[in-house]
Amino acid sequence: MNLAARPQDATLLADLNGEAALLDHRGALFLPDHRLLVVSDLHLEKGSALARRGALLPPYDSAATLSRLATVVEEYRPEIVVSLGDSFHDGWGAERMPDPFRAQLLALIDGRDWFWIAGNHDPEPPAGLPGSTVREVAVGQLVFRHEPTRGDAAGEVAGHLHPGARIVRRGRSVRRRCFATDGRRLVMPAFGAFTGMLNLRERVLWDLFEPARLRAHMLGTDRVYPIAGAVLRPG
Amino acid sequence: MSEQIGLFDGDIAARLPEPFLRWFAERGWAPRPHQIELLARARGGASVLLIAPTGAGKTLAGFLPSLTGLAARAPRKPGAAFRGVHTLYISPLKALAVDIERNLGKPVAEMGLPIAIETRTGDTPTHKRQRQKHVPPDILLTTPEQLALLIASADAERFFAGLRYVVFDELHSLVVSKRGHLLSLGLARLRRLAPDLQTIGLSATVADPDALGRWLVPQQPPGRMADRIAVEGGAKPEITILASDERVPWAGHSARYAVPDLYQAIRGHNTTLLFVNTRSQAEILFQELWRVNEDGLPIALHHGSLDVGQRRKVEKAMADNALRAIVATSTLDLGIDWGDVDLVVHVGAPKGASRLAQRIGRSNHRMDEPSRAILVPANRFEVMECRAALEANYLGAQDTPPLLDGTLDVLAQHVLGAACATPFSADALFDEIRTAAPYAALDRATFDKVVDFVATGGYALRSYERYARIRRTKDGLWRISHPRVAQQYRLNVGTIIEAPMLNVRYVRAGRGTASRGGPVLGKVEEYFLETLSPGDTFMFSGKVLRFEGIRENEAYVSNAAGNDAMVPSYAGGKFPLSSYLADQVRGIVADPARWQALPSQVADWLRLQRDKSVLPKRSDLLVETFPRGDRHYMIVYPFEGRLAHQTLGMLLTRRLERARAQPLGFVASEYALAIWGLRDMGGMIGSGRLPLANLFDEDMLGDDLEAWLAESWLLKRTFRACAVIAGLIEKRYPGQEKSGRQVTVSADLIYDVLRAHEPDHILLRATRADAAAGLLDIHRLGEMLSRIRGRIVHKHLDRVSPLAVPVMLEIGREPVAGEASDVLLSEAAGDLIEDAMGPT
């Protein structure tokens, strides 16, 4: 394992179903043994998707998402990138994407094995972009798919649910995106600039994990904070 | 009318039409001179501003031109088209419009005048609104939001073509907010639809009546004003400061010490109104009064968070004189006239002298008899503030807030509304908008940017042309691109953006959120409820409640055992000390001759300060430094209000950090600011390493402010309001949120992305201007910094000074204003490590 590649403030999660994994505070997962980077729910071109319906949100969400992705890619230098589904907010997102952003994305893809996992928002391959569109990818002890499966799914890394966690300390409430994991499976935080979150205490998320071992790795400004499941608040 | 009419004066009254003369004569009344003067000026074609105290017959005066005009009008011939609205009456409160309908309807019926008077508010049923569109009443009583909706409809032109008068009630309170900006734009539009219309503004006494005079008439040429009629106040109010034998506390806001005295005052009067500044104070005072209410007097509670049904019940009981006392916040503030109040008590400092005048006006609505009021300071600084307010009221000094320039988010809303009504030409709309006083100085480039924002979001990256909400067509006119746009506009009209609130619902104890709900008690801010854990107690609706949990958009509560509760720390309803009163308080502190008007314990406190430290001169800024425990303190006394002090605290700690003084935190009160740190700031100042002139230099409002603002949650909160008003994001309705969080985009995320990619976007410009005027009070801070240049007095002490005690007591009581939520995460993560180590 190449520790030199590990940026200082990421949290090392020694064991995810037997694989070493790094949880990055920007919301990316890195497997050093496989030089594999995972991001989930980019929801590129969400701004323009909403603009079509009359909400003229700033058209810079793709730019914001991609520049964060570029930073992470630059730091970890992965050989394989997995975009874990809902990479585009809708099926026309890739077509709508303004040229400068498309160029930025192409530069990231160039020279890497790039997997687009099909999501519910984007079941088809993104128009005009390289990379393989697949339903799932298996690497080592892990399998990557968009929607988490019910029941026991050891080694599953999924997205789709946009987990977020909330704590209350000293009369103040803090709500952040998070990685949710019990050591066997993991649900990724949404990476996109305009993506919201769903509280980990909601049953659809909570029931996926073994409660006693559940941790919310909440995304801080420059590191990830592991919080025990019992501390988390609904809402 | 319920108002009393003065002595008979045949000469002036002779100008009235016959039915009016008869009506007055039958009652042995006569119109007052200002009522007749207003009528004469209106008949001469002028718009008029009437400034008069409560009880002077303002409302009748405002309607006389309409009533006499309508009475003289030839009846409509059968079969002829219905005439449009003749007079529009706009009030800040729905309840006020309803009140006027009743009070105006009575004399109109008694005189047998064929005049139709109707209200139109958010509560008006749809079928009635529809009917009003086809058969408009002669006099329509409504609110600013309803006016915005009316002028944005396609038939506005027909509806308002015959409009003769627009009457603005409580104009002084309408004009000082964004609501007033929207209303001024609506008025500009009305003037275009009905070029002959005249305005009549009714106002309480204000600091700058010229500004109101300009607001009422088109600013072409700039500076034009409506005619002004001012009525002198009636009898001087009898105001006293509560003289209690109890000790006045150093700090705090509850005024618990005064409760036995207040109870005696309530017993000694028919009906007492007790005003407080915040809802949490109202809850506490209500509880405390009932604790001592041995006679079981009917004492009620009224504030804006309570359930509407419950509020109406209290108001009715009040009108029926069934109550002996009512504890209220500003929801009862405006000129609604209820019952037979013979005493007003103001608990806590009144914050602004004109607020005090308004509140005292509540007592005894007869202009010729003096009002009675008691001021109850909650702490020692407030004793001085009450003293200053009292003197101001006698002196007639006024400190209503200045009128600010029109904001751009409101302008954007209006531009979209204009397009919903009818296609517009940018040139004509620009000219029309500049006739509105708040927008008289608007430049064309900014206007064009706002139009561009309404059309496509106004982004430098021009990728939304095909999604435009309004488009310029070949004829050069802008029109909406789809009927859906008008629907969206109607749902989002208005400028009142409230913090998200949850219903508070009563359930049986211990059943958690699984229990079936009982009655709704009212609404509480979501952010407050979020900090509670099941089992926590808080005071609301006059009860101590136990928090059971949140389900969807409701908070479940049950009866709590015991009387002690954590109190809702509502942000709502806190008013900063006005500049005028602040100056007066500084004046009192600086001048020992004025101390004899103060209670002896307060005067002794100031004497002690003079002996142990120093008393600042009126325009000086005192800075004290001293060690205490293992920390070093710096206390600053600007007397500029909590908002400005909080901003100052943020900026000073940044500077102290750079100067390596290692500041740890600060707390701001209405009067002072305390900063503490690890290094001896007094020593650093004394040795010249930390020059105070540099520390307090006005340049802190430049880069430091920008740097801090960029990350501040204050700005994010302001942005959300601007974005909703401007129509970028939709209003949030209760219940939508939970399902909506994944789907919609939160304002915070939009703010972050926009700031990173287009920092000079028009909406960010609007946000910064708003925050500067509002939450940050930067204008006031700037004035203070320039006032104290070269006048900073430093006193290094070896221990805490008497003047510093109140703000020192706030430390730990007030949450330290903070941005660093990562610190909290870090602590929670630390718990995990302790957990992991297991019990030892």
Image (tube, coloured by chain):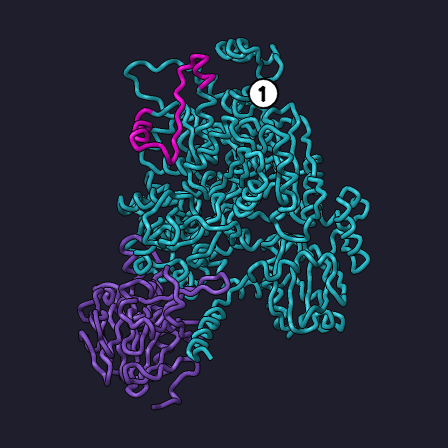
Chain colours: A purple, B cyan
Q: How many numbered marks are there? A: 1
Q: Nearer the viewer, residue B512 or A129?
A: B512
Amino acid beneath label 1: Glu
Residue B365 is left or right of residue B155, and the answer is right
Chain letter of the residue carrying label 1: B
Q: Nearer the viewer, residue A197 or B489?
A: A197
Question: Where does the magenta region start and end?
Answer: B106-135
Residue B382 is left or right of residue A41, and the answer is right
The residue shown at (76%, 55%) is B616
The part of the image, by quadrant, that contains residue B657 is: bottom right
Q: Nearer the viewer, residue B220 or B710?
A: B710
The part of the image, by quadrant, that contains residue B623 is: bottom right
Instruction: Tell me if residue B376 is in the magenta stretch.
Output: no
The residue shown at (49%, 26%) is B320
- Give the crowd class for mark 1: few <14, some 14-19, many >=20 residues within 10 Å: some
Image location (x, y in percent) of residue B23: 51, 11
Q: Is residue B751 above or below residue B94?
A: below
Residue A172 is left or right of residue A41, and the answer is right
Q: Nearer the viewer, residue B234 or B463?
A: B234
The residue shown at (36%, 78%) is A23
Q: Is residue B417 above or below residue A176?
A: above
Image location (x, y in percent) of residue B242: 69, 39
Regarding residue B417, the answer to whether it shows in the image is yes
Image location (x, y in percent) of residue A6: 39, 85
Image location (x, y in percent) of residue A206: 30, 67
